[in-house]
Image (cartoon, rainbow, N blue to C red):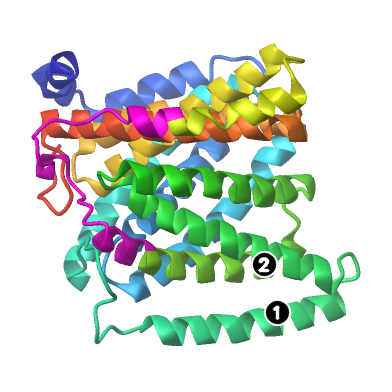
Amino acid sequence: MLFIQRIFAHPTLAQIPRPAIVVFMLILGTMFPDIPLKASITLMALAFVQNAAYSLQSRAGNRTSNLYHFIAAVFSKLVFFVTLSFLVHIQVTLNVLLTYILGTMLGSVYGTRLSIVIEKMLGAVADLGEEVKGQALPLSRAMLGLTILLVLELAAIGYYGVQYDLYMLAIIALAAYVSDLLFAILRVARNTDAYWFHLSFAVIQAAAGFAVFSVLVKMNGDWFLFAPYLTGAVLGSLMGAEAGKRFGKHLKASWNAQDLKKNVVPLPIKQGIACALLLVPHLLYFGLGSLAQQLLILGAALLQTSAFTVISRARQRNHELYIEWASIFSNGIWFVTFNILVVNELAGYLLIPFLVGTGIGSLWGQAFAMSIEKQIGAFVNTEEKK
């Protein structure tokens, strides 16, 4: 960890002009003959807006303002749906990886910057516990309004949409609600120091999230699905954020690594073993057939979720250099994994390896991120560092 500390603290790295990085990666990204400059810029713009929007929602969900969370969630889901439709359409080849990473890195940085400004204007802070009273948008009103809106949407789309029946639309809304509710709780959990809390929701959310993502990909981001998907997702995000913060306080979890009692970041060994035990019944039932494919999926899920956890924690902490490198690491792995999922649909027998990789990767990313944060002083609710 001393090596990592020296990297982040190195004056040369910290003083590299941001435009120089942009120009360098743009040149590299457009050297491939099958990527026109116009297409590269379009992809970078989408990636920038997507990650800026997600940074806003990610921070808003852990702050004390329901109105900010609501607006950020709607914006983020809209951008996600547009980006998903575009990526599915172009079949995300690895040739556009560099330009995509560039857009995501800048989006994460500037989205976090904007969120910090908004949080200061609203007086919103990261806090574990019950909803702050006297807000402009109480949670109860938001839930009632969104539920009524969802019923009206299902009725209207079911009447005018000839392609899908009401049952299918309700399933999409429910799947989005459950997935985002669990993810909002997971977002709180992965940003604390509680390993069991994190592991439990990492595995559960992975199963729900994989299901709804698969449905959306199969239907090519059909806009008939957007309204119920959006409403269900925002409902889940608001309720999950509140549940996660309450649960975190009940467990006496902490946002920051410097609050650990023994002043040392513990390794999640017990939790990792417990997660790996899921492979025992899986192997007994399916055997060692297609072992290489199972190991590939397990490894890919492990890398993906460890990267997700690191960037999720980085977005919550006001350390710009930490966000930049975490974004490059995270979004590069996500892009490759997304390509695999779209081109080759996973069979059902690969679900357990996927979940085990997700659980262990989440734990590893949490421990790794806490170690980095402790070394470089990247904490929640502190002044921004470059």
Report the amino acid beneath label 2. Answer: Ala
Q: Which residue is nearer to you in this view: 116 or 69?
A: 69
Q: Is residue 295 left or right of residue 121?
A: right
Mark 2 crowdedness (10 Å alpha carbons): few <14, some 14-19, many ≥20:
many
Which is more N-terminal, label 2 or label 1?
1
For the N terminus, give its image quadrant.
top left
**Magenta region:** 244-273
- Does residue 100 appear in this view? no
- Does residue 288 appear in this view? yes
Residue position marked by numbered label 2 in the rendering: 173
Q: Which residue is nearer to you in this view: 385 or 284?
A: 284
Q: CA distance from mark 1 to mark 2?
A: 10 Å
Q: Give the residue drawn at x 77%, y 83%.
A: 155
Q: Which residue is nearer to you in this view: 276 or 117?
A: 276
**Position of residue 292 measured from the top left corner of the image (x, y, whole percent):** 68, 12
Q: The residue tagged with tag 2: helix, strand or loop?
A: helix
Q: Quadrant of residue 22?
A: top left
Do the residues bearing badges 1 and 2 touch, measured as CB atoms within 8 Å?
yes
Report the amino acid beneath label 1. Answer: Glu
Vertical arrangement, residue 124 with respect to residue 340, above or below: below
Q: Is residue 190 left or right of residue 164?
A: left
**Position of residue 230 measured from the top left corner of the image (x, y, whole percent):** 60, 66
Q: Is residue 222 left or right of residue 294?
A: right
Q: Is residue 168 left or right of residue 190?
A: right
**Position of residue 369 measured from the top left corner of the image (x, y, whole percent):** 27, 32
Mark 1 crowdedness (10 Å alpha carbons): few <14, some 14-19, many ≥20:
some
Residue position marked by numbered label 1 in the rendering: 153
